[in-house]
Structures are given as C-alpha cells and as structure tokens.
Image (cartoon, grey):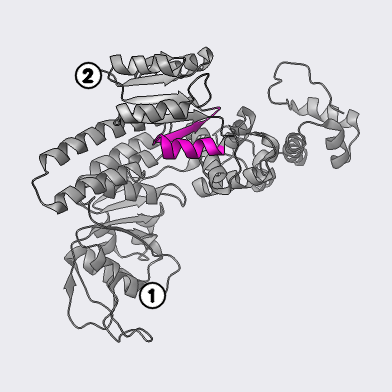
C-alpha cells in the first residue's frame, strides 16, 4: 500500500440502500469495500488490507457480532465498529465482550458522525501499528519505557486526545484543534479562553495527552468557589501538623504532577493572595507547602482557562499581569456553541446516546425537525446547557425517535434574528418598533411553541390559548407559521 493511498474500510450490511448511503458519506476520504453478508466480507478481508470494519448487527446468516468475533481472531489490528438499532441491549454487551469492538453506532446515524467515527478509527489503526512497532524496537529497553507506550495507547483508546472534541468537517472548532495540536508539542504554558461550557477542559486534557509529558500525570484543579486555605493545601500541600485534624503531611498537586501537567480552571476567580503564590511558581518553578519553611521545586507544565474578558481584568488591575503573561505564553480561544451550528446535530446526538446508555433507556436519535429547533436557539450555557437539555428530553421521551414536542418551551420559542443569534423576549421588549409590532413578535413565538409542543393538534392548541379554531387558523396564516415537514403543502387540521 502506497503512503498516499486512502485507508480502506469494509462496509457490511444486507441492505443495499444502507451500503450506498455509507459509501456516499465516506468515499471521499476512504477506499470503500462493500459486502451484503459475512461470507463475502471474509473473502474481501482475505484479499485486501482493511483498516476498519463497519458491520450491521442484524443480517441473515451470521450476525454482526459473530462476524466481528471471527475477524478479531484473524485480523486483530483491524478496528471493528458495529451498527445497531439500539434495541438489543444484550447484543451490544455481547459485541463489546465477544467481538472486542471499538465503538457501536446507532441507527439512524448522522453522516458527519459516521465520517468522524471512521476517521478516528483509521487514526487508531495507524497509531496502534506505530505503537506496536515502537514497542517491538524498545523491547530491550527499560520497563518504564514500555509502560509509556502502553499508557499512550490506553489514553488514545479511552478518548483522552483531540478525537474527544466532536465536530463537523467544516466546524469552526477545526482551526482551534489544529492550533491546540501545534501548541501541545511545545512545553510552554497555554491560556484557553472562552465562555463557560465550551470544551476548555477537553482541550487541555487533549493537549496533555498529545505532548511529551503524556506518560506523566494530568491534574485538573478548579479555582472557582474554593477558599484560599483549601486551595493552597490542594496545590502546594501541607507539612505534618500544619493542618488541624491531619497529623500526617499532605502532598500537593504540584508535587504529584512533577514532570506532568496541571490545568487551572477558572483562574480569574483566584484571590490576590493565591495569584501571587501561583505567579511565583509559574515564573520560578518554586512553591512553599503550608507550614513549610523551605521552598520546593517541581517541573510542571501549567495550562489555564479563563473567560474572554481576562485581558480587561488585567488592565483594570483585578488580575495580576505577571500571572497573566506567565500563564499565556500562547492562547487558544474556544468558540461558543451559537457559532457552531454545523456541530450541533453531532453534539446533541452524542449527548443523547451517552445519556441513554447511562440511564438504560435506548433511543434511536433526534428527528430532523427537533434538530432544526435546537439550531435556532442561542445556547447561552453552551455544551453544558445542551447536555442538560438532552437528558431532559430523554426522560420525557416515549418513542425511539425524539421529536420537537419534547424540547423545552423557551428553546421552541427562540427565533433567529438576521445576525443568526436568538432574539430573546427581553430583547424584543427593548427593541425598536411600535407596541403592536413587539406584541406580535411575542405572540408569534407563543403560537409556534404551543403548536409544536402539542404536535400540531389545533383543537388542543386553541383550547389552551383561549382561541376558537377559526381564530387560531387566522393567526397561523397571518404569521406564516408552517408545520415542519409540510412546507408548501396545504395545512391539514388535526382533531
């Protein structure tokens, strides 16, 4: 296989239209082989150098689990991914235990999610081969070096690297990840700035596991809402007898993380006292444990996160400039979710499936209409708010495909402005225009939210809103509110 050849993926499904859909999503980046049964797939494996297998679970003859189990025995390095309807919990468990699969995808899958999974699997195959080769070359070296190889492989498999940052092919996060990858290999401090809930912690962790310190510890310390006394002990440790009720000494994070990385989350919440102490360590590499008389050294790479306005806080004197410049040899800015509309479907489905697995309530995914409503919203709480919304939707769900009627009312009422950002009720009240115009904006949102929540049952909607069916129909026509999926068609009334 030439160096420039595309990775080869084997797609196995007894339904021709499913194979065609998968090939369409992957063929620009991969050499795709297809088979409609396990026997044909085995023959293709014998004839080609296959890096990744996508296999449907339910097929005539051998199931996906049975085929992937046999493939593991004959081609153990090939990364195996199973596609399931997410209704056979026992099958999924068997696939993980018996076939040693890397990942399972649920139907209906999203093309961007499928492509991202394929790229991650191909990277895993390549890196596993490289690690195996490295381990072979180093078998006569120390056990510590062999342990480093295994630790790096384990970190990769557990999703601690940049593959943990889910995104679409044209996502604004792509440039952020590319920049973070570049910084990761240089042993300098990095300040990650952005709004709360924009994956700053995930980026910091990925940078550590992509750095030369990846075989050493990674610690995350939350600097927000913690008393100085507790934070000082947590970071710097304490000598014997220095802490009431603790007769033994305590080792701090900066000592535990020697030769590793410490991520300081929310550094703008640090007191002036802690800012001075951390600035000393950041510039000189020394710290004093609580109750200690002598300074101690530790070789630690510092990563930190802060809000967008940290530079203004420095100018205003609320954050020490020496600490700011010590922690920000380089900076990475994470975009908010409101500018990541192309990523929203992937992120929402991922949060939903994670919640479904955690709570044992299988679902197939979100409907297209539900995704469109989610994309209209501004998400001021970013990924944390999106994750919470997916858990809430899962709790109230009754069907395998989750529709927009389950979405929170304030999200259903969101209406994008010309700039692409949501114009909330407060903004409507403060906007320009006559009283009638502003009241109509709010009325239109209430109508759309009520109809969506009640699955466009106009009788129920009219009763809830205190309108006649004729009055409701007149308002729908006046505001041009159209039921999703029926654009351009005559609206039919539901009883």
Other residues around mark 2 within 10 Å, as few (<14) / some (14–19) / many (≥20): few
Q: Quadrant of the N terminus?
A: top left
> Does 319 sit above or below residue 206?
below
Q: Is residue 267 visible?
A: yes
* Residue 4, disc: 2
User: In the drawing, does residue 273 fall left or right of residue 2?
Assistant: right
Marks 1,2: beta carbons within 8 A: no
Residue 351 versus residue 236 in the image, above or below:
above
Q: In the picture, residue 495 is in which quadrant?
A: top right
Nearest the camera: 142 or 458? 142
Is residue 92 located in the magenta-colored stretch of the structure? yes
Q: Residue at 61% x, 28% y: name it.
A: 368
Q: Which residues are magenta?
A: 89-108
Residue 112 appears in the rendering: no
The residue that mark 1 highlights is 230
203 versus 417 height, above or below = below
* 364 displayed left or right of 124: right
């Amino acid at each position: 296989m030439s160096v420039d050849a595309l990775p080869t993926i084997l797609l196995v499904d007894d339904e021709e239209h499913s194979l065609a859909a998968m090939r369409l999503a992957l063929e620009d980046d991969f050499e795709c082989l297809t088979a409609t049964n396990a026997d044909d797939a085995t023959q293709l494996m014998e004839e080609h150098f296959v890096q990744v297998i996508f296999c449907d679970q339910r097929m005539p003859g051998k199931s996906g689990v049975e085929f992937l189990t046999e493939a593991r025995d004959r081609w153990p390095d090939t990364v195996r991914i199973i596609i399931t309807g997410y209704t056979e919990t026992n099958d999924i468990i068997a696939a993980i235990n018996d076939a040693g699969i890397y990942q399972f995808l649920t139907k209906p899958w999203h093309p961007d999610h499928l492509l991202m999974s394929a790229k991650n699997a191909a990277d895993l195959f390549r890196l596993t081969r490289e690690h195996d080769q490295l381990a072979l070359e180093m078998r006569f070296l120390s056990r510590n070096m062999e342990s480093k190889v295994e630790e790096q492989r384990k970190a990769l498999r557990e999703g601690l690297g940049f593959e943990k940052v889910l995104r679409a092919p044209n996502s604004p996060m792509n440039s952020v990840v590319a920049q973070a990858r570049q910084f990761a290999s240089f042993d300098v401090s990095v300040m990650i700035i952005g709004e709360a809930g924009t994956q700053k912690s995930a980026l910091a962790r990925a940078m550590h596991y992509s750095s030369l310190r990846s075989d050493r510890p990674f610690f995350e310390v939350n600097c927000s809402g913690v008393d100085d006394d507790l934070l000082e002990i947590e970071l710097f440790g304490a000598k014997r007898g220095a802490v009431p009720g603790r007769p033994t000494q305590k080792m701090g994070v900066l000592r535990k993380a020697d030769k590793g990385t410490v991520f300081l989350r929310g550094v703008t919440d640090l007191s002036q006292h802690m800012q001075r102490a951390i600035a000393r360590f950041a510039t000189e590499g020394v710290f004093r444990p609580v109750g200690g008389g002598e300074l101690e050294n530790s070789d630690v790479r510092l990563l930190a996160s802060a809000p967008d306005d940290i530079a203004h806080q420095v100018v205003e004197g609320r954050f020490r400039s020496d600490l700011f410049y010590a922690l920000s040899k380089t900076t990475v800015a994470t975009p908010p979710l409101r500018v990541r509309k192309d990523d929203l479907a992937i992120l929402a489905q991922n949060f939903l499936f994670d919640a479904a697995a955690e709570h044992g309530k299988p679902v197939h995914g979100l409907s297209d209409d539900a995704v469109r409503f989610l994309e209209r919203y501004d998400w001021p709480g970013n990924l944390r708010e999106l994750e919470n919304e997916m858990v809430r939707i899962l709790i109230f769900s009754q069907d395998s495909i989750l529709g927009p009627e389950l979405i929170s009312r304030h999200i259903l009422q969101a209406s994008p402005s010309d700039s692409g950002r949501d114009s909330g009720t407060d903004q409507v009240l403060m906007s320009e225009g006559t009283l009638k115009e502003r009241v109509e904006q709010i009325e239109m949102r209430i109508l759309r939210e009520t109809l969506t929540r009640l699955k466009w049952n106009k009788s129920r909607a009219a009763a809830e809103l205190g309108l006649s069916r004729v009055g409701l129909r007149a308002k729908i026509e006046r505001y041009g509110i159209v039921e999703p999926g029926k654009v351009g068609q005559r609206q039919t009334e539901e009883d």
